[in-house]
Amino acid sequence: MSQSYDRGTVEDFGRWRSFTAGMWAWIFHKFTGWVLIGYLFTHIAVLSTALAGETAYENTIVGLEGLAIVRLLEVGLLAVAVFHILNGVRLLFIDLGKGLEAQEESFYASLVLTGAITVASVPTFISGVF
Amino acid sequence: MAEHYSSFDRSGTRWLLQRLTAAFLVVVLAFHFFLLHFVNHAADVTFAGTSARMSTWTYFSLMVLFLLTATFHGVNGVYNTLVKRDGVDGWKQTAITAVLVVASLIMVVQGLRTALVWTNLF
């Protein structure tokens, strides 16, 4: 006899223990998307210092890059961007009807690749600041 | 339980544009990160270096397209999350739409103004 039960909606975070890989992928994609659009506004604001002249632009960028916290945040930004890109590629394939049967595996692969690329990039991002 | 989770109605123009801009951004965002953090380092940035890159038509047009597509993709995603998926309507929908449109316009205008400071193409 078949048995069915309501596992709740993806927004019902109180039931996170029963979330499937697809639901986690949806949540991570939303979270990384919010971070990236927030960063885009910040990025344009920082680059806009070029409107105040060459010195203001260079002093702003070099000053920010001289802060260890900024370098660490950049590593976090890379992790967010890499996951959004890899999971985005996964979503594009799923939208094209490819890989739906392997969507859990491709989500885990996105996470592992994101971790590997992020860890490998740490030396580049923190060089010269510590 | 759904097989596929998405905030978008998979038939509209905004859904299609979100996918088209995604395909473009996957490549350009990766290129942008690689060029400005691994080939060149952000800590060594100079106005002259940025200006040299922005004074070639290929790079300039790529960055302008990057600005436009990233703004659309990000704001369209936010709009979809806040308005479509959450079922907001009436004056709240109008207010959210207005704020997002104004914010997008400010970002694009500010981005273009900055791009024009760097380039000597015009």
Image: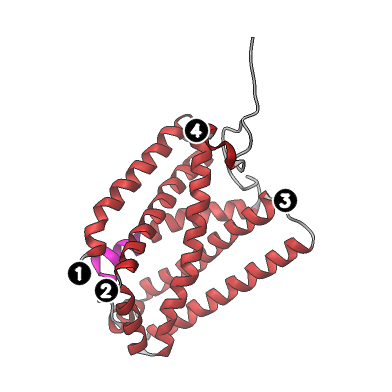
Helix, strand or loop for disc 3:
loop
Which region of the structure is painted magenta?
B30-44
Q: CA distance from mark 3 to mark 1?
A: 49 Å
- Which residue corresponds to mark 2? B43
Helix, strand or loop for disc 4:
helix
Q: Amino acid at mark 2?
A: Ala
Say which chain tag 3 marks: B
Where residue B50 sits in the image (x, y, percent)? 32, 78
Where residue A36 sits in the image (x, y, percent)? 47, 60
Q: Local crowd at mark 3 within 10 Å, few (<14), some, or many (≥20)?
A: few
Where residue B15 sits in the image (x, y, percent)? 60, 51
Where residue B91 sits in the image (x, y, percent)? 78, 64
**Vertical comparison of B89 with B102: above or below:** above
Q: Looking at the image, can residue A96 be seen?
A: no
Helix, strand or loop for disc 1:
loop
Q: Along the polypeptide, which appears first: circle 4 or circle 1? A: 4
In the rendered structure, find residue B87 and report the number of the disc placed on it: 3
Q: CA distance from mark 1 to mark 2?
A: 9 Å
